[in-house]
Image (cartoon, rainbow, N blue to C red):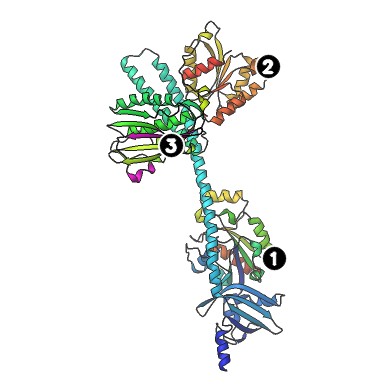
């Protein structure tokens, strides 16, 4: 071999090997470029790839190419392209060693596939989490609904009991019962609020309201609450803040009372302060900062995020009441308002919770109707002298039946018929004459909203026009709107206050 | 000379084709996912009955979500097909019936086994409803990780191929 041949062999085509094989699979020649093949050996024995050699011979094509075939020979692994050319009495096998090229490709494919699989798994995980969240919220909503019936009975019976002749000890017990009922109702409302926020079903209801009135109500309430613990309550607000603003008064009240209750819970001495500052007033928008400061136990910095999660409570020496929903509700409500609650705290010295909200302010607001809440005494005078009204009570829950029956009878204004099955309502209504129907929604056989629709579609005016008051534990806005659309005149959510129900009944009696 | 049968393992990438083969051939498993590019070929002698065995030549093909793009050369001379999907990743079985139709067209009537792999990642009730919802009839439900049904699946195919020849 000349020098030139040697140089050529060294630098040219070092990655291509030519092999000639007879039709029985014996190796006839090999240039041994990178795989040592012994003449006379069967190609089938070199690597399992060649076990399909006979199939290749049987194929109709004159040449076949295999790309990216991994071949391990003599303890070395090559990634190759193989071309097989069929000649008259032999086969030419050309092996290209493309190991380097394919290893580069493999790292690209690895990154691509991993990225696709990971993003698929993230999507699946999210779907799973959303499903769990949906299930949890549905469970909480059903659970709270189921609790409303017995709670309605307890509250109503407590109210009835309060009106009876009681000695001092019994009255103290009733007061305790009322306080416990109120706590239970607030807890139920909190659970419902958090599940509605989480499921996106809670919507803000912005209306014009008097901020000063709201703050004064809070001041009155918390002066009393703090004095019971020998604490001081201080409220300060900037009088440049417009009095009338547009926003969700109820939810702002809920946020502030949750923060104040939280401060009250963790403060044993000193002062609780509510401070409202004007950040800025631009065009028709007013940005306000609300701060609730306390001189309580404070929060360790590592816990300052966790306290806003549902069912999280600070570990304290004396176990505090509550299930840890208050701050989570604050966080959720402020998020709906496009804001967030922040906290600064020094353990042992106290905490300041603060947030900014933007409310609408317009110059002509003073002329707009203002939402005012006034407790009005129930006016039963219009019923006096009237014959007794005939009420159909449609309710399957025995406790609610008893409570309503007793409470309505005590007014001496009503005759009451009772039906506890949705399927019996229509027949009862046809055979009697009622002034009003009190209708539960979740009834056996036919639900109350369906019965209402049927009654409203009835051809006789005296039946289709009977006022129907819904009484239900399904307290979501869309539920109530649906029942009103079905033809109910009003809906009273459970647990209801009997006075509220009576007021609604009187309003709709003709 | 011992009978040898070529089988190809097909399916989307990441469904565990290589892991199934590794479990069957070496009785081992690794959680590290290494992409297969091109084709790896291994051989295993499988005893189909007492005193009767065949040499199974297993072609482990690069996974693809475009089954029609599988190179015909890889399928040349195949005696059986295993089509694998991942029970925990819907994208690997949502087009299963179309994928199987394409494979059947490319392999012309040779035995085809449908395998749902990674059953260790889903609970049985969910798995059954998932198969029902997607109208999937898998011949074998396997786990390369735990070894569930892996040997049975390959041995079943080997037996069929042995009996056919």
Identity of the residue furthest to the top in this view? A385
Alpha carbon of mark 2 to alpha carbon of mark 3: how far?
57 Å
Helix, strand or loop at label 1? It is: loop
Q: Is residue A494 left or right of residue B3?
A: left
A214, A325: nearer the viewer: A214
A320, A428: nearer the viewer: A320
Q: Position of residue A60 (x, y in %)?
A: 72, 75
Q: Where is A411 relative to A426, above or below?
A: above
Nearer the camera: disc 2 or disc 3: 3
Q: Residues within 10 Å of mark 2 (few under 14, many from 20)?
A: few
Q: Residues within 10 Å of mark 3 (few under 14, many from 20)?
A: many
Where is mark 1, residue-wise? B108
Tag 2 subunit: A
Helix, strand or loop at label 3? It is: strand
Identify the magenta region: A277-306
Q: In percent of the image, x 49 and y 37: which residue is there?
A: A336
Where is mark 3, residue-wise? A356
Q: Position of residue A488 (x, y in %)?
A: 59, 22
């Amino acid at each position: 071999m000349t020098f030139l041949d040697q140089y050529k062999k060294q630098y040219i085509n070092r990655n291509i090997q030519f092999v000639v094989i007879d039709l029985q699979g014996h190796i006839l020649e090999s240039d041994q470029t990178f795989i040592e093949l012994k003449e006379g050996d069967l190609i089938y024995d070199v690597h399992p790839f060649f076990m399909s050699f006979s199939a290749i011979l049987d194929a109709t094509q004159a040449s076949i190419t295999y790309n990216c075939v991994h071949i391990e020979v003599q303890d070395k692994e090559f990634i190759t392209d193989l071309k097989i050319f069929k000649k008259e009495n032999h086969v030419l096998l050309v092996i290209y060693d493309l190991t380097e090229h394919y290893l580069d490709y493999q790292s690209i494919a690895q990154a691509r596939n991993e990225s696709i699989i990971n993003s698929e798994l993230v999507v699946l995980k999210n779907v799973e989490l959303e499903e769990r969240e949906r299930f949890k919220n549905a469970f909480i909503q059903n659970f709270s609904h189921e609790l409303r019936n017995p709670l309605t009975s307890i509250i109503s019976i407590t109210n009835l009991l309060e009106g009876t002749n009681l000695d001092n000890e019994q009255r103290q017990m009733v007061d305790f019962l009322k306080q416990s009922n109120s706590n239970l109702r607030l807890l139920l409302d909190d659970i419902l609020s958090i599940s509605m926020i989480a499921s996106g079903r809670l919507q803000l209801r912005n209306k014009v309201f008097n901020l000063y009135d709201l703050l004064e109500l809070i001041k009155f309430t918390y002066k009393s609450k703090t004095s019971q613990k020998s604490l001081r309550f201080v409220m300060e607000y900037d009088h440049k803040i417009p009095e009338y603003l547009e926003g969700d008064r109820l939810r702002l009240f809920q946020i502030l009372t949750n923060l104040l209750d939280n401060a009250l819970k963790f403060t044993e001495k000193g002062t609780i302060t509510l401070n409202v500052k004007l950040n800025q007033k631009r065009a028709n928008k007013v940005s306000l900062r609300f701060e609730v400061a306390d001189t309580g136990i404070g929060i360790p910095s590592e816990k300052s995020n966790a306290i806003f999660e549902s069912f999280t409570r600070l570990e304290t020496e004396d176990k505090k009441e509550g299930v840890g929903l208050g701050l989570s509700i604050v966080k959720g409500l402020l998020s709906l308002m496009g804001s967030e609650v922040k906290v600064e705290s020094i353990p042992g010295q106290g905490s300041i919770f603060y947030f900014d909200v933007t409310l609408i302010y317009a110059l002509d607001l003073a002329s707009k109707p203002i939402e005012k809440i006034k407790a009005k005494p129930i006016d039963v005078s219009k019923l006096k002298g009237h014959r007794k009204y005939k009420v159909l009570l449609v309710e399957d829950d025995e406790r609610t039946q008893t409570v309503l029956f007793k409470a309505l009878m005590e007014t001496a204004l009503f005759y009451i018929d009772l039906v506890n099955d949705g399927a019996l309502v229509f027949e009862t209504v046809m055979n009697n004459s009622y002034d009003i129907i009190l209708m539960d929604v979740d009834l056996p056989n036919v639900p109350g909203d369906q019965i209402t629709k049927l009654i409203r579609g009835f051809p006789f005016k005296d039946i289709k026009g009977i006022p129907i008051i819904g009484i239900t534990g399904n307290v979501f806005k869309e539920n109530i709107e649906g029942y009103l659309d079905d033809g109910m005149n009003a809906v009273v959510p459970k647990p209801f206050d009997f006075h509220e129900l009576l007021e609604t009944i009187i309003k709709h009696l003709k | 000379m011992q009978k040898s049968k070529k089988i190809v393992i097909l399916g989307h990438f990441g469904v565990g084709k290589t892991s199934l083969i590794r479990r069957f051939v070496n009785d081992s498993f690794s959680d590290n996912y290494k992409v297969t590019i091109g084709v790896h070929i291994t051989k295993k002698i499988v005893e189909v009955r007492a005193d009767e065995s065949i040499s199974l030549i297993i072609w482990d093909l690069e996974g693809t979500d475009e089954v029609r793009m599988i190179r015909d050369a890889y399928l040349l001379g195949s005696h059986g097909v295993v089509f694998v999907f991942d029970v925990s990743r819907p994208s690997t079985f949502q087009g299963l019936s179309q994928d199987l139709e394409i494979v059947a067209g490319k392999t012309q009537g040779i035995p085809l086994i449908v395998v749902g792999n990674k059953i260790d990642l889903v609970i049985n009730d969910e798995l059954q409803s998932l198969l029902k919802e997607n109208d999937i009839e898998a011949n074998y439900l396997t786990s390369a990780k735990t070894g569930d049904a892996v040997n049975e699946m390959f041995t079943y195919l080997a037996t069929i191929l042995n009996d056919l020849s």
